């Protein structure tokens, strides 16, 4: 072998030790101990060294293709399919889709190197300030992180919308759906869906958006009665015994923020592959296919197996919990005004609230209006002031 030999540390050590054997400085037994090989292997190495010199100590497959090398045609096929169908997919996600949809098995690193050489992928280096990681909670349901993500989910094929997303802190289990806007109703719908599926979480971690929490000065009535102003979402959580924890930075609720990134990468591409362009179709796909698959892949077991969720009592009506709640004053003629509609307290309501007393008005998520007095449904009729016959139509309490 002409030129300088490509010898590593192992080959150099073997050359020096075997040269001592040739010179008679040490025995072959001593050489086998120094080289950490068996006596028979030491004999074979010595024979090759005497016959070929240092070249005999190099690996026989040096410079030859690896027996485990992927077939060049198969690698090119993977790149061609990626170029046609999966442009923009990360190597990991692309490998999953190549196996799932095209029956092509290829390692992530092999595909990544092939895509880089073809100019189809470039790794992204992100340098950010360091934030110490908070240890996750130990039980499923102890804490659920909550947030909305505005994104071009349909990549221009459909309307812009918001993903409402909940992620369990201990396991990473996620539940989400798309909605036109990030509203209080959407937040309550998602929490209600979580409770129906898993139970009542002990705490929710959200940011300071008005859809979740309220940050205003109390009114005079609230000050006189010692009432702390709360959003409708906070009131619903309070009725169920859920603690609301407010995050003051995106990093504080990093788990749901990182989960958004997974949705913005994988879910967008899944919608593209499925040809989905509407919110309703996307939500159906989320419930039937995406969420079960993503939770099976990324959710992890909690540190403690005990479920931290509180079971929902049978008599609890979630419609009456997740609602928009207001208070109104009964007028002298026993009429209650709410959002440009008038409600007359029926005469068969006994006892009957007196003029000047306050009643509670709850608007359920389905839009229906329900009135309560002293924590009991109030019998009312809608009063149509522009009707000459003063017609009254019953209203469900």
Image (cartoon, helix red, strand yellow):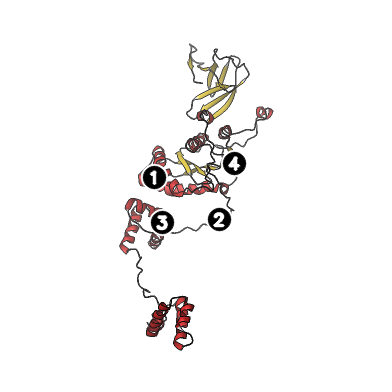
The disc, 4 or 1, on the residue closer to the chain's N-terminal end is 4
Q: Which residue is mark 2?
A: 128
Provide residue 117's location: percent of width, then percent of height: 39, 63
Q: Is residue 3 visible?
A: no
The disc, 2 or 3, on the residue closer to the chain's N-terminal end is 3
- Name the secondary structure under disc 3: helix
Placement of 118 over or under 234, stated as above or below: below
Query: The N terminus is located in which quarter?
Result: bottom left
Provide residue 332's location: percent of width, then percent of height: 61, 15
Disc 3 packing (10 Å; few <14; some 14–19; many ≥20):
many
Placement of 129 over or under 53, stated as above or below: above
Q: Which residue is mark 1?
A: 271
Provide residue 338's location: percent of width, then percent of height: 55, 23
The disc, 2 or 4, on the residue closer to the chain's N-terminal end is 2
- Name the secondary structure under disc 4: strand
Q: Which residue is mark 4?
A: 245
Disc 2 packing (10 Å; few <14; some 14–19; many ≥20):
few
How far is mark 2 from mark 3, CA to CA? Answer: 23 Å
How far is mark 4 from mark 1, CA to CA? Answer: 33 Å
- For the residue pair 212 and 383, the one nearer the viewer reads as 212
How far is mark 2 from mark 4, CA to CA? Answer: 25 Å
Q: Which residue is mark 3?
A: 91
- For the residue pair 49 and 65, the one nearer the viewer reads as 49
Q: Tell whether label 3 touches label 2 (CB within 8 Å).
A: no
Residue at the image point whose x is 32% and y is 52% from the top:
102
Point out the residue furthest to the top here: 389
How far is mark 3 from mark 4, CA to CA? Answer: 37 Å
């Amino acid at each position: 072998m002409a030129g300088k030999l490509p010898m590593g540390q192992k080959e150099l050590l073997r050359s020096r030790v075997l040269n001592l054997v040739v010179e008679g400085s040490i025995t072959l037994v001593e050489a086998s101990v120094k080289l950490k090989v068996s006596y028979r292997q030491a004999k074979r190495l010595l024979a090759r060294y005497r016959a070929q010199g240092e070249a005999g100590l190099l690996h026989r497959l040096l410079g030859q293709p690896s027996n485990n090398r992927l077939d060049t045609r198969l690698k090119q096929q993977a790149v061609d399919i990626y170029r046609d169908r999966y442009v923009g997919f990360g190597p990991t996600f692309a490998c999953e889709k190549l196996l799932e949809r095209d029956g092509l098995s290829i390692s992530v690193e092999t595909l990544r190197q092939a895509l880089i050489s073809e100019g189809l992928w470039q790794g992204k280096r992100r340098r950010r300030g360091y934030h110490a990681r908070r240890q996750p909670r130990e039980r499923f349901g102890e804490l659920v992180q909550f947030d909305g993500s505005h994104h071009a989910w349909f990549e221009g094929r459909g309307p812009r919308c918001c993903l409402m997303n909940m992620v369990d802190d201990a396991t990473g289990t996620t539940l989400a759906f798309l909605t036109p806007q990030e509203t209080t109703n959407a937040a309550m719908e998602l929490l209600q869906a979580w409770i129906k599926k898993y139970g009542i979480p002990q705490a929710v971690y959200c940011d300071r958006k008005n859809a979740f929490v309220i940050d205003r000065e109390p009114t005079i009535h609230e000050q006189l009665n010692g009432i702390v102003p709360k959003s409708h979402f906070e009131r619903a959580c309070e009725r169920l015994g859920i603690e609301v924890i407010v995050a003051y930075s995106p990093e504080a609720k990093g788990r749901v923020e990182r989960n958004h990134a997974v949705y913005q990468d994988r879910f967008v591409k899944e919608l593209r592959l499925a040809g989905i362009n509407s919110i309703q179709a996307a939500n159906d796909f989320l419930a039937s296919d995406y969420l079960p698959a993503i939770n099976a892949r990324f959710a992890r077991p909690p540190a403690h197996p005990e479920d931290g969720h509180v079971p929902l009592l049978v008599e609890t009506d979630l419609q009456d919990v997740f609602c928009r709640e207001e208070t109104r004053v009964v007028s002298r003629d026993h009429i209650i005004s709410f959002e440009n509609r008038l409600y007359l307290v029926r005469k068969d309501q006994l006892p009957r609230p007196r003029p000047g007393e306050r009643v509670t008005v709850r608007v359920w998520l389905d839009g229906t209006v329900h009135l309560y007095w002293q924590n009991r449904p109030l019998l009312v009729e809608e009063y149509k002031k522009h009707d000459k016959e003063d017609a009254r139509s019953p209203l469900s309490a």
